[in-house]
């Protein structure tokens, strides 16, 4: 069953009882919440994701609840907890939808050490992954959102899951986090894109979450081989350029975006070396979204299927 098959009252009841098991492959998350903002966001953003029976196993058990007592009454806040333990400081209740997204990312980074996890956006075309590892502010989520509406399949805008056994890369096809001017930029670039309500005053500015394309969700279990690693840097007003770089240079910069590189020791080194070794490596400086997408599109021209 998809989450879209649930009526809003039924979804709220499952959330209140802690019986919503959301399939975000390769993970299953049990979500509990008493906040209408969370129910509304899940119904809109996760409509194409699967819902499992409540007695099934879950990888993470998370809660987003209102803060009770005088403090919560004077200034309504929400808290995020994992397995009953509060993970972050409380935030305003209207921040609850992005708090859930940040919390799910934290769960994966903190616990999913079966993968080498990169802070990177990832899209796929013809079985090959385009990996965009970069620190915040580089424009990787904006590029990812644009490419996801130009014939590339969304894997992730935030976390690349690298399988050290197979050398493949996967993602969870979850909503794309966009901030400040990026929402308007993507709205113009891809009018078909759908966004959650904007949330102002967060630590990252004004945020909105873009719905993942339905096809990306339906193919979320399909991993991809490394195809290209592109190190992006946004520069307002700068010329947009895509330049090849040496794999050694790329390797050193990608290690800085690996959350759990040290956890894997020698296997992490070998796995990352394999990833970089299979990919073509580039540096992208971008100040114009259309120009950047055109350059990235040229790396893997779409195959046009014709009737015979």
Image (cartoon, grey):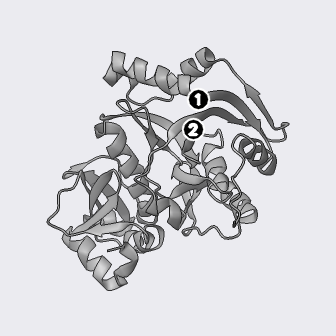
Q: Which residue is mark 1?
A: 279
Judged from the image, the secondary structure of the residue bearing numbered disc 2 is strand
Spot occupied by residue 283 in the image (x, y as percentages of width and height): 70, 29
Spot occupied by residue 194 in the image (x, y as percentages of width and height): 60, 69
The residue carrying pointer 2 sits among few (fewer than 14), some (14 to 19) or many (20 or more) residues within 10 Å by Cα, namely many
Observer-nearest residue: 230 or 104? 230
Q: Do labels 2 and 1 touch, CB within 8 Å?
A: yes
| Residue at figure coordinates x 44%, y 37% from the top left | 168
| Residue at figure coordinates x 70%, y 52% from the top left | 302
Residue 70 sits in which quadrant? bottom left
For the view shown, which residue lies furthest in the left direction?
A: 55
| Residue at figure coordinates x 39%, y 66% from the top left | 49
Q: Which one is earlier in the sequence, the residue at label 2 or at label 1? A: 2
Q: Is residue 76 above or below residue 281?
A: below
Observer-nearest residue: 308 or 134? 308
Query: Is 45 on the left-hand or right-hand side of 23?
Result: right
Q: Is residue 194 above or below residue 8?
A: above
Spot occupied by residue 125 in the image (x, y as percentages of width and height): 60, 48
> Residue 131, labelled with which disc?
2
């Amino acid at each position: 069953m998809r989450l879209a098959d649930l009526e809003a009252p039924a979804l709220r009841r499952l959330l209140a009882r802690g019986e919503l098991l959301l399939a975000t492959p390769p993970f299953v998350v049990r979500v509990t919440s008493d906040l209408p903002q969370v129910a509304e966001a899940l119904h809109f953003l996760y409509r194409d994701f699967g819902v499992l029976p409540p007695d099934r196993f879950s990888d993470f058990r998370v809660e987003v609840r209102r803060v009770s007592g005088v403090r919560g009454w004077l200034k309504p806040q929400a808290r995020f907890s994992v397995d009953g333990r509060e993970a972050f400081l409380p935030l305003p209740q209207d921040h609850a939808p992005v708090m859930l997204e940040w919390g799910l990312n934290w769960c994966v980074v903190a616990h999913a050490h079966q993968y080498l996890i990169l802070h990177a956006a990832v899209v796929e075309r013809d079985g090959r992954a385009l990996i965009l590892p970069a620190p915040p502010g580089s424009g990787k989520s904006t590029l990812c959102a644009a490419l996801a509406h130009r014939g590339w399949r969304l894997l992730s805008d935030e976390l690349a899951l690298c399988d050290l056994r197979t050398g493949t890369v996967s993602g969870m096809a979850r909503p794309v986090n966009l901030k400040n001017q990026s929402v308007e930029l993507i709205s113009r670039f891809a009018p078909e894109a759908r966004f959650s309500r904007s949330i102002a005053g967060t630590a990252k500015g004004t945020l909105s979450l873009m719905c993942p394309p339905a096809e990306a969700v339906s193919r979320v279990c399909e991993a991809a081989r490394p195809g290209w690693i592109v190190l992006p840097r946004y520069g307002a007003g700068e010329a947009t350029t895509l330049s090849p770089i040496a794999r050694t240079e790329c390797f050193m910069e990608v290690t800085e975006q690996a959350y759990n590189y040290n956890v894997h020791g020698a296997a992490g080194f070998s796995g990352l070396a394999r990833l970089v070794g299979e990919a073509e490596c580039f540096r992208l400086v971008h100040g114009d979204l259309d120009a950047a997408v055109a350059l990235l599109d040229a790396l893997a021209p779409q195959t046009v299927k014709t009737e015979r």
